[in-house]
């Protein structure tokens, strides 16, 4: 079968590999849709050793076979699953940082999410796998994991209905976060310098979008009658954006760092301002079983629309083409098909 794995010559590409063998509790999924994530691009540019890097974690498909003892699923079911499972009982799990659980990153699907056949291990089958309702497509279901990250980001921003939250960046993640904010009764303001992305945000129901050409602070001040926004979610992070975000936020507000830093990892914050105005800086890394369930429900109830985010559909054979489109900012979301 085909899978995107490390090549002997270096890098990653289409390889022919034997289908994974099933153990007790596992299921074997025929991949039907698998989304390319920004973290896949990061893994591709900084491989930490090909053996440990697995690409693809936003997938859905049809169950081909189940291992001994599986009762939740049968062949023919359409299923989506996440790639990591926290233990639920360690310090990190008990404190709401499940993505920092030592078990979290030690778990994964086999051989990866960009494969014709994917083995979903027992732990995943038990804790982070969902059967699709008839009306949900595999493409839609493949957004469960990224949408769960968006749900978790909104939770960590501690929003209340009516809050005005700026979402910086209207890429795939920004548009998911904005829709979760809408579903929670808050008032997102989506900022981006690309008019096409702002148009897509409007199409998805975001009432306020803006091109912050005049600066984020000035733009948000004008949009909030000088009050400042109640929170900012940064889906793009660099020194200038962080400084602007700090100045655009009201006293007591939260800055949510939702992405890796684009340039230098060390950025400056005005700590005197942070103290005197009691600002909070939080970050959001990945999803949890609870937010996966919430995301799946949002998709099933059609309260979040994801199909308009898909800009490119490609076969696994055109893996590199999808990576190029995403890297060059030409794609909102690339979804691969076998
Ligand atoms: Zn992802
Ligand atoms: Zn844990």
Image: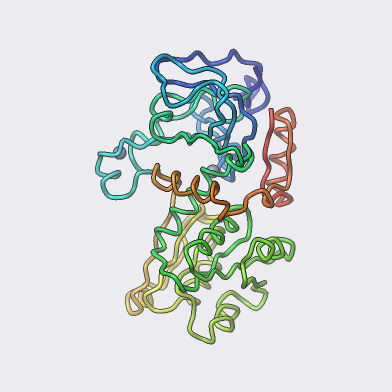
Residue nearest the viewer, comparing 163 with 98: 163
Residue 140 image offset from top left, x and y in percent: 61, 43
Q: Is residue 4 left or right of residue 146?
A: right
- Relative to 164, is 155 above or below? above
- Relative to 311, is 64 above or below? above
Instruction: Give the residue at x 32% y 50%.
Output: 96
Where is residue 13, by image quadrant?
A: top right
Q: Is residue 237 left or right of residue 127?
A: right
Residue 199 image offset from top left, x and y in percent: 72, 64
Q: Which residue occupies the extreme bottom position in the image?
A: 225
Q: Is residue 323 left or right of residue 220?
A: right
Where is residue 157, by image quadrant?
A: bottom left
Q: Quadrant of ligand 1?
A: top right
Tally the numbered discs. 0
Instruction: Give the residue at x 29% y 45%.
Output: 92
Instruction: Give the residue at x 48% y 67%.
Output: 185
- Relative to 85, is 144 above or below? below
Question: Which quarter of the rendered picture does the N terminus lie within?
Answer: top right
Residue 130 image offset from top left, x and y in percent: 48, 36
Residue nearest the viewer, comparing 11 with 174: 174
Q: Which residue occupies the extreme front position in the image?
A: 134
Residue 46 image offset from top left, x and y in percent: 56, 38
Residue nearest the viewer, comparing 301 with 307: 301
- Relative to 208, is 82 above or below? above
Question: Which quarter of the rendered picture does the C terminus lie within?
Answer: top right
């Amino acid at each position: 079968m085909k899978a995107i794995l490390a090549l002997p010559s270096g890098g990653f590409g289409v390889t022919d590999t034997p289908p994974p063998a099933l153990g007790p509790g596992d299921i074997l999924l025929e991949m039907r849709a698998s989304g390319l994530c920004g973290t896949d691009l990061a893994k591709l540019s900084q491989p930490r050793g090909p053996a440990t890097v697995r690409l693809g974690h936003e997938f859905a498909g049809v169950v081909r076979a189940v291992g001994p003892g599986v009762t939740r699923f049968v062949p023919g079911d359409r299923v989506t699953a996440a790639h990591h499972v926290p233990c639920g009982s360690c310090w990190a799990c008990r404190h709401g940082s499940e993505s920092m659980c030592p078990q979290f990153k030690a778990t994964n699907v086999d051989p990866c999410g960009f494969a014709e056949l994917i083995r979903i291990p027992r732990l995943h089958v038990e804790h982070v796998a969902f059967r699709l309702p008839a009306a949900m497509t595999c493409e839609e279901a493949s957004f469960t994991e990224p949408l769960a990250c968006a749900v978790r980001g909104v939770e960590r921003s501690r929003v209340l209905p009516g809050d005005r939250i700026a979402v910086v960046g209207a890429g795939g993640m920004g548009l998911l976060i904005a829709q979760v904010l809408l579903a929670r009764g808050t008032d997102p303001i989506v900022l981006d310098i690309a008019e096409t992305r702002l148009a897509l945000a409007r199409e998805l129901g975001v009432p306020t979008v803006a091109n912050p050409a005049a600066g984020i602070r000035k733009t948000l001040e004008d949009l909030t009658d000088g009050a400042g926004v109640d929170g900012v979610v940064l889906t793009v992070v660099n020194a200038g954006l962080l400084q602007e975000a700090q100045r655009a936020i009201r006293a007591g507000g939260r800055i949510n760092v939702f992405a890796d830093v684009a340039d230098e990892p060390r950025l400056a914050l005005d700590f005197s301002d942070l103290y005197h105005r009691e600002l909070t800086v939080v970050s959001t890394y990945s999803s949890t079983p609870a937010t996966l369930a919430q995301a799946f429900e949002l998709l099933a109830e059609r309260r979040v629309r994801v199909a308009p985010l898909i800009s490119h559909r490609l076969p696994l054979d055109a893996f590199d083409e999808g990576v190029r489109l995403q890297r060059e900012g030409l794609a909102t979301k690339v979804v691969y098909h076998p």
